[in-house]
Image (tube, rainbow, N blue to C red):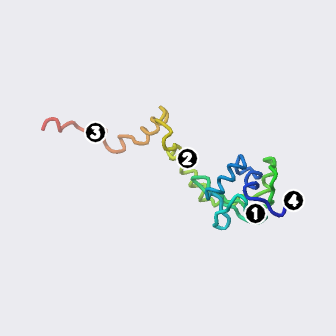
Amino acid sequence: MNEVARIDKWLWAARIFKTRSIASDACKNGRITIKGVNVKPSHTVKAGEVVSVKKPPITYSFEILQPIEKRVGAKLIPEVYKNVTDPKQYELLEMSRISGFVDRAKGTGRPTKKDRRQMDEFIDPAMFGFDDFDDDFDDV
């Protein structure tokens, strides 16, 4: 295979991004780094380099095993890269999934009934001690 490959082509060929243009945009927006340095889409990579990909809320890290430029089937991915992402990043991802409210992007509209019920469960009045609230203030 090739000795080197463009980073945008490799990200697409390794199935990290769905299209090459999305991979290219990720490079231009500073979400792809190698050794802590942002890279341009035309940056060439070789085997052994570690690529960091920021996909909020976490940063994935991949060690390049084969610098390819032609897309391969999903079964061949273990031959192309090794996932060396820090386990703490996956804990961060799980925490954001548990919280549930991180997924809602600003401006996506009103909450659905299901979202509303989840918010009501999250902010339960019993938690603040309002269940045994007396109306003694009306007599004053």
Q: What element carries label 1?
A: strand
**Residue underneath mark 2:** 97
Question: Upstream in the sequence, badge 1 or badge 2?
Answer: 1
5 relative to 137, above or below: below
Q: Nearer the viewer, mark 4 or mark 2?
A: 4
Which x, y percent locates residue 83? Answer: 71, 58
* Marks 4 & 2, CB-CB < 8 Å contact: no
Q: Are marks 1 and 2 in contact (CB under 8 Å)?
A: no
Q: Point out the image quarter for the N terminus.
A: bottom right
Position of residue 123 in the picture relative to residue 20 (left or right): left
Q: Is mark 2 on a helix, strand or loop?
A: helix
Q: Which of marks 1 and 3 is nearer the N terminus?
A: 1
Q: Where in the figure is residue 110, as x and y percent of width and height? A: 46, 35
Instruction: Estimate the spatial distance between the alpha carbons at disc 1 and disc 2, rounded to whole Å.
Output: 35 Å
Looking at the rendered structure, the kind of residue marked 1 is: Thr
Left or right of 122 in this view: 86 = right
Where does the image place residue 24, in percent across and percent down from the top left? Answer: 69, 53
Which of pointers 3 and 4 lies earlier in the amino acid sequence? Answer: 4
Residue at point 76% right, 63% down? 45
